[in-house]
């Protein structure tokens, strides 16, 4: 008696089919993990790119900024930034751009470049404002 061959199940997967299915599962899990972790990864970057036409409006408070922050201003390098901080420590807070022109090494042309980029808030030393 001849037995008929056992019919192949439609759920039987060949080795190649199993490899493809496993690869697809790995991709789906990786993409799902990335979608879950991406907000945390982006938050750690700390830098956002601006859209076309957007501008950052930021003014440096001359009375609160340290030398490194002042160094970022146009025309102010590390030497002038240090001179501004030292002058502020000796003479007190700055009230206007004209006061900045009194700092040795800060010329009138440098002061003109700073117009609109700096502000003159109350100087904070040791947590209490200086008059």
Image (spheres, rainbow, N blue to C red):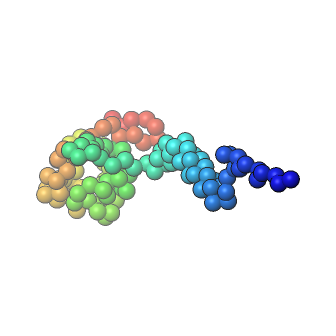
- Which residue occupies the foreground of this view, 35 or 102? 35
Residue occupying image coordinates x 61% and y 52%: 21
- Which residue occupies the foreground of this view, 116 or 42? 42
The image position of residue 68, as x and y in percent, is: 37, 56
Drawn side of residue 128 relative to residue 85, left or right: right
- Which residue occupies the foreground of this view, 22 or 9? 9
Q: How many marks?
A: 0
The image position of residue 14, as x and y in percent, is: 67, 57
Drawn side of residue 66 relative to residue 103, left or right: right
Tell me if residue 106 comes above or below residue 37 in the rendering: below
Residue occupying image coordinates x 51% and y 43%: 35
Residue occupying image coordinates x 49% and y 42%: 39
Drawn side of residue 40 relative to residue 9, left or right: left
Q: Quadrant of the C terminus?
A: top left
Q: Is residue 37 visible?
A: no
Q: Is residue 77 visible?
A: yes
Residue occupying image coordinates x 47% and y 41%: 126
In which image quadrant can residue 93 be found?
top left
The image position of residue 63, as x and y in percent, is: 32, 44
The image position of residue 98, as x and y in percent, is: 17, 47
- For this orientation, the residue located farthest to the right is 1
């Amino acid at each position: 008696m001849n037995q008929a061959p056992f019919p192949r199940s439609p759920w039987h997967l060949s080795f190649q089919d199993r490899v493809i299915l496993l690869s697809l599962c790995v991709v789906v899990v990786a993409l799902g993990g990335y979608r879950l972790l991406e907000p945390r990864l982006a938050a750690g970057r700390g830098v956002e790119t601006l859209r076309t036409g957007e501008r950052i409006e930021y003014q440096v408070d001359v009375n609160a900024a340290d030398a490194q922050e002042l160094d970022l201003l146009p025309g102010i390098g590390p030497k002038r930034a240090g001179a501004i901080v030292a002058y502020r420590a000796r003479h007190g807070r700055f009230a206007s751009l004209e006061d900045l022109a009194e700092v040795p090494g800060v010329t009138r042309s440098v002061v003109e470049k700073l117009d609109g980029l700096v502000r003159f808030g109350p100087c904070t030393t040791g947590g209490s404002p200086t008059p």
